[in-house]
Image: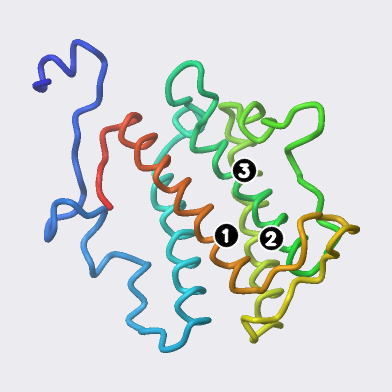
Amino acid sequence: MDSGEQEREGVAERWTRATVYPDMWVDPDDDPRESGEQPVDERGILLDYLRGYRLTLEMKCAGLDAEQMARRSAPPSTMSLLGLVRHLTDGERHFRRVLAGEDAPPLYRTDQDRDADFDGATPDQETVDAAWEQWRTEVARTDRCLAGVTDLSACNAGHSDLGPEPGGRHQLRDLLVAQIAEYARHCGHADLLRERIDGRVGQ
């Protein structure tokens, strides 16, 4: 589809802010994921991947207004960037709940509406601001929890058959990999959502 066809169809033209590598989101010197530090052990590598995907989520949402954040991908999907922020906020709480047995029930999802994180992603700035504030709060709480556990073979505080999260005991490394995979999956969704909103592309 050429640019004229895109305009007639209401499809954004693809573009990137990067100038060094056109398939990147930003240039290397402007990329906050590039810390300049190279992790040397398994724990450091896993935490660095988690940090990178969290930053990617923020980057994919940067510069958008409330309507764009809440814009859904395509019917019948309810997925939006704002919905992903809310969904991953509950994911951070789930991680702490499983890892440390904390009392951290979902903020959005309910038994009555298991998609409330997406269904409640309305296009108003107050909802967007609240979602980001809560996400950053939960990320900080997760990081404090992780700082207290250095042994990747340490098992979670849950119970095998009782407790807040059934499913057995898991090592910290298992939980970290699962959390990274959750972010990676949804950052892939964010790639497509952002491209559909304003055409911006890049890793």
Left or right, 88 with respect to 36, comes to: right
Amino acid on which disc 3 is placed: His
Q: Which residue lies furthest to the top in this view?
A: 8
**Vertical side of 107 occupied by 31: above or below:** below
Q: Distance between the residues labelled 2 and 1?
A: 7 Å
**Residue most toward the bottom?**
40
The spot of residue 143 in percent (x, y) is 64, 72
Do the residues bearing badges 2 and 3 touch, measured as CB atoms within 8 Å?
no
Horizontal placement of 52 versus 5: left or right? right
Which residue is label 2 attached to?
A: 95
Task: Choose between 31 and 147: the one closer to the eye.
Answer: 147
Chain-order first, disc 2 or disc 3:
3
Q: Using the image, tell me which numbered label, if any, was put on residue 87.
A: 3
Discs 2, 1 touching: Cβ within 8 Å? yes
* Residue 147 in picture, x, y percent from top left: 66, 81
Provide the residue designation for mark 1. Answer: 179
Q: Which-is-in-front pick, marks 2 and 3? A: 2
Nearest to N terminus: mark 2 or mark 1? 2
Q: In this view, does 178 lie to the left or right of 120?
A: left
